[in-house]
Amino acid sequence: MESPNRGKNIMKTLCLAIVLGGLALSPALQAQPSEDTVSVPVSARQLRIELPDAYSKMWPQDYRELMANYSLSNGQTLSILGRGTNMYAVIDSGPLHKIVSTSRNNYVALDRQLKMEIVLHDDENVSGSVTMVVPSQSLSDGRFVPEQVVLLAFR
């Protein structure tokens, strides 16, 4: 027959094991993000403006249809202009950026400040997007906003 103390010792041991196991899990559970937190890896959506090794200079007859003003989702306007035998893009009244064709409907500024996708549809509508570098800024409250790359849709 077992002694009553042995049963108590087993129970104490089990309780101690449960408590210690719970304490060991506690930091692991605390390290888990809460349900209302979503982590997005930095590399998941890095916008870049790259000029590929192979690109095409467009001649005025090639880009005549593209020359227009395009409204962007942030309220700014992208304008495609022809100057001599070159094609340029400008956002609002900013600097001119000489652009080249990198593939069908895709264009990049040689200074790597703009990248555009401009799709001209048969029904006279246009769709596309602009990836652009927004220069660093010092705000009136003293804060500094570093240079960033943003993606804007046509509207």
Image (tube, rainbow, N blue to C red):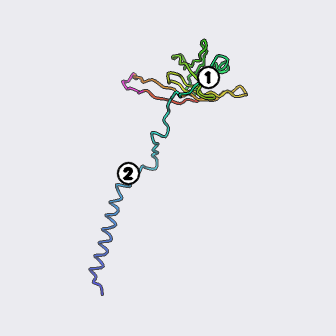
Type of amino acid at the residue the image marks with label 2 = Ala
Residue 132 x/y as whole percent: 51, 26
Asked if residue 26 lies left or right of residue 79, the reply is left
Looking at the image, residue 74 lies above or below residue 2 = above
Residue 51 x/y as whole percent: 52, 27
Look at 34% across and 63% down and name the residue there: 21
Task: Name the residue that disc number 1 marks.
Answer: 70
Q: Earlier in the sequence, mark 1 or mark 2?
A: 2
Q: Are marks 1 and 2 in contact (CB under 8 Å)?
A: no
Q: Quadrant of residue 19?
A: bottom left
Looking at the image, residue 40 lies above or below residue 124 = below
Instruction: Indicate the quadrant containing the N terminus: top left, top right, bottom left or bottom right.
Output: bottom left
How many marks the image carries: the answer is 2
Q: Residue furthest front?
A: 54
Look at 30% across and 75% down and name the residue there: 10
Asked if residue 43 lies left or right of residue 121, the reply is left
Residue 115 x/y as whole percent: 55, 27
Quick one: 1 or 43, which is closer to the camera? 43
Over which residues does the magenta segment extend?
140-146
Cα distance between the residues tagged 1 and 2: 47 Å
Quick one: 95 or 70, which is closer to the camera? 95
Q: Any mark on residue 49, and which?
A: none
Task: Examine the structure image and report whether residue 142 is included in the region drawn in magenta.
Answer: yes
In this rendering, does residue 155 appear at all? no
In this rendering, does residue 48 appear at all? yes
Look at 37% across and 51% down and name the residue there: 31
Type of amino acid at the residue the image marks with label 1 = Tyr
**SS for callout 2:** helix
Task: Examine the structure image and report whether residue 69 is included in the region drawn in magenta.
Answer: no
Instruction: Indicate the quadrant containing the C terminus: top left, top right, bottom left or bottom right.
Output: top right
Task: Name the residue that disc number 2 marks.
Answer: 31
Quick one: 54 or 104, which is closer to the camera? 54
